[in-house]
Image (spheres, rainbow, N blue to C red):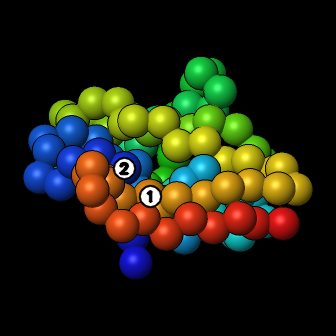
Amino acid sequence: GWCPLSPTGAQTTQLLVEPPWTPAVLWDGVTLTCQGSGTPNATTWYKDGWNWWKEGPDHFIVTKSGTYKCHRPGTGLSNPVTVLNDWLVLQVPAWAQLEGDTMTLRCRV
């Protein structure tokens, strides 16, 4: 399912990644969804630090590697999500981990 990359219940803009692994890899068909208050389809997307898509949709399928953020009026700027196009990637679950938790790692080729 969808996984927020910021604490649950926070009154901030959240950038969700599907499938819920980090770093995300382009060849998984990654979908990013921006959640926050305000007008639907009034999302501003940033790619690699640049204003990339003003008044864009709330979600889209990523077609280029890079670091993405989104901004929603009323709740502000999200944390970044990096999407790689590397041929070998070590991934961890995208949800928050606590010390002592058992963690599944994925080595992707």
Q: Which labelled disc corresponds to residue 5?
A: 2
- Left or right: residue 86 versus residue 65 is right
Mark linked to residue 109: none
Residue sitting farthest toward the bottom? 1
Which is nearer the eye, 53 or 23? 23
Q: Which of 72 and 95 is in front in this view?
A: 95
Whether residue 35 is visible:
no
Q: Residue at x 27, y 49 (%)?
A: 99
**Circles 2 and 1: CB atoms closer than 8 Å:** yes
Question: Of the residues shown, which amino acid type is indicated by label 1?
Answer: Ala
Specify the farthest residue to the right. Answer: 87
Residue 76 visible within the image: yes
Question: With 19 as the anchor, is 1 left or right in this view?
Answer: left
* Neighbourhood count class around disc 2 (C-alpha, 10 Å): few under 14, some 14–19, many 20 upward: some
Residue at 73% from the left image edge and 47% from the top image edge? 84
Q: Which amino acid does label 2 sit on?
A: Leu
Residue ID at (70%, 38%)? 66
Residue at position x 55%, y 54% in the image: 22
Q: Where is residue 26 in the image (x, y as percent from the top left)?
A: 75, 58
- The image quadrant where one finds the C terminus is bottom right
Q: How crowded is mark 1: few (under 14 residues within 10 Å), some or many (20 or more)?
A: many
From the viewer's side, name the closer residue of 78 and 25.
Answer: 25
| Dot placed on the residue nearer the N-terminal end, 2 or 1 | 2
Q: Position of residue 96 (x, y in %)?
A: 31, 53
Residue 94's disc is 1
Residue 53: quadrant of the picture: top right
